[in-house]
Amino acid sequence: MSAVNDPHGDWFTPGQVAGFVGLLVLGTALGVGSYGVGHRLAGTGSGAVVAAASAATPDGRVLYAGNCAGCHGTKAEGAVGPALKVVGAWNAADFRHAVLDGKTPEGRTLGVVMPRFATTGLDGAPPTDAQLAAIQAYVRTLQ
Ligand code: HEC
């Protein structure tokens, strides 16, 4: 077919678009497949299971780096915000309450510089308990 006779003018024809999408899907499938093979070869068990688990489990390190490190320091050593050593000892509910609503276990209201993540969201989405647990677990590894 030539572009001159093409009723769609300069646009891609549905056939071309379908071919395009097909290639994308194929490429993605191949990429995921080889990721799995790599893991199997590396002896880490089923690649498919590893890939599925990492997609479902929030990464505390990434969440902390993207939402907290700018103020609390990459090692939670403190910067604009305080060091987060004390929160390693807090239970999960206390940690959630502080991060979501700005309240410490002693009932102190945190200054307004500390975001209320229940309102602002984590990475733009409402924070889940699993994400907050992952962040707290990561902060504990920094102490
Ligand atoms: C814009 C800067 C900023 C960001 C971003 C920020 N914080 Fe804070 N944070 C603060 C400040 C400032 C304080 C101290 C407020 C006060 O004591 O009144 C604080 C206090 C805290 C406290 C209480 C610490 C204590 O000793 O009582 C916790 C827990 C905390 N932040 C966790 C987090 C976590 C987890 C994130 C990321 C999800 C985060 N913060 C992101 C600025 C920030």
Image: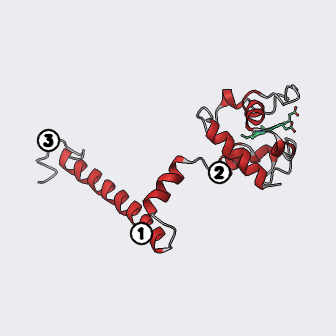
Q: Residues within 10 Å of mark 2 (few under 14, many from 20)?
A: some
Q: Which residue is mark 3?
A: 7
Q: Residues within 10 Å of mark 1 (few under 14, many from 20)?
A: some
Q: Which residue is mark 1?
A: 37
| Ligand 1 closer than 8 Å to label 1 CB | no
Quadrant where the image shows the C terminus: bottom right
| Ligand 1 closer than 8 Å to label 3 CB | no
Q: Residues within 10 Å of mark 3 (few under 14, many from 20)?
A: few
Q: Is residue 10 left or right of residue 24?
A: left
Quadrant where the image shows the N terminus: bottom left
Q: Is residue 66 left or right of residue 95?
A: left
What amino acid is labelled 3 in the image? Pro
| Ligand 1 closer than 8 Å to label 2 CB | no
Q: Is residue 76 left or right of residue 129?
A: right
Secondary structure under tag 1 reads helix
Residue in view at x 32 percent, y 54 percent: 25
